[in-house]
Structure formats: C-alpha cells, structure tokens
C-alpha cells in the first residue's frame, strides 16, 4: 500500500526518465489519471492509456524526450504532502520559474494547472510544481 500516491507517481516518472525508459506503467487511480492528463495536455508527457490487467487497471505512459534522450521534465516537486497539506487561493498563485514551469492543483473543478485555476478563479490543494 502506498501512503502518498502523488509522490509515488512523480517518483515513477522521475526514475523512468533518469533510466531513459521509453514508457512507464503506473497503478491506476482517478487522481493519477487526472495528473497524467494535465501533464500530457501541457506537453510534458507523450501518450497514455488505461489498460486492465486482470482485476486491476494500470496507466501506461509514454515519456517525452528532446533530441537524444534529453529530459523534458527536469524537476518534479511534491508540494502538498499527507502530513502537511497546502491550500492556495487563485489570487495567491505565483508564476513558477518566471512562467516556464507550472503548478498543478486539485480544485473543486478537477485537476488544473495554475493558469487554468486563475482563469477559472478557483483555488485548491497545491499538489506539485513542475519545470
């Protein structure tokens, strides 16, 4: 059992990219699928699909590289943790790396990037920062 599924997801992606794998398989949950969809829509990950393996589901994610296996994601930072949740309002969101990175939030309207949360005028739990 994993106590922090978001940290597990980020660690699996980070480890697979460091090892220069083409894809990674992650146990399925709605939260993880939402995070992967946001990363895919923003261009940090390649394609992904949900696959049933027996009675369990997995998400197969294709990783993206620039040129000859140079990382697209250089930093994945888990901000809110199970022992210390961090909530922000849309007015408190600051640009990550002068706009080159992004923050991902869990909001009442779903998993959103910091830019989408500002446009929707909704705050939430700050899950992670990525650049």
Image (cartoon, grey):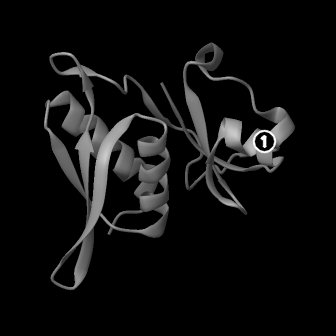
**Residue 128, located in which quarter of the rendered image?**
top right
Q: Residue furthest bottom?
A: 55
Residue at the image position 27 percent from the left and 46 percent from the top = 12
Q: Answer yes or no: is residue 4 visible.
A: no
Report whether 18 appears left or right of 109.
left
123 relative to 51, above or below:
above
> Circle 1 sits on which residue?
119
- Secondary structure under badge 1? helix
Q: 104 or 79, which is in the foreground?
A: 104
Report whether 118 appears left or right of 17.
right
Q: Answer yes or no: is residue 122 visible.
A: yes
Q: 59 or 124, which is in the foreground?
A: 59
Q: 1 or 49, which is in the foreground?
A: 49
> Measured from the top left, where is residue 124 in percent x and y?
73, 52
49 relative to 89, above or below:
below
**Residue 100, located in which quarter of the rendered image?**
top right
Q: 92 or 48, which is in the foreground?
A: 48
8 relative to 27, above or below:
above
Q: Quadrant of the N terminus?
A: bottom left
> Measured from the top left, where is residue 57 in percent x and y?
27, 74
> Measured from the top left, where is residue 83 in percent x and y?
58, 53
Badge 1: how crowded within 10 Å, few (<14), some, or many (20+)? Answer: few
Report whether 42 appears left or right of 104.
left
> Measured from the top left, where is residue 70 in percent x and y?
23, 18
Residue at the image position 55 percent from the left and 49 percent from the top = 81
């Amino acid at each position: 059992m994993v106590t922090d599924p978001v940290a597990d997801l980020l660690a699996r992606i980070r480890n697979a990219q460091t090892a220069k794998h083409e894809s990674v398989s992650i146990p399925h949950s709605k939260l993880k699928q939402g995070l992967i969809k946001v990363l895919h829509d923003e261009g940090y990950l390649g394609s992904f699909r949900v696959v049933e393996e027996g009675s369990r589901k997995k998400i197969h994610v294709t990783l993206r590289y620039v040129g000859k296996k140079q990382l697209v994601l250089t930093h994945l930072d888990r901000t809110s943790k199970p022992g210390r949740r961090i909530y922000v309002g849309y007015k408190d969101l600051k640009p990550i790396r002068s706009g080159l990175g992004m923050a991902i939030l869990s909001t009442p309207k779903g998993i959103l990037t910091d830019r989408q949360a500002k446009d929707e005028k909704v705050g939430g739990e700050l899950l992670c920062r990525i650049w």
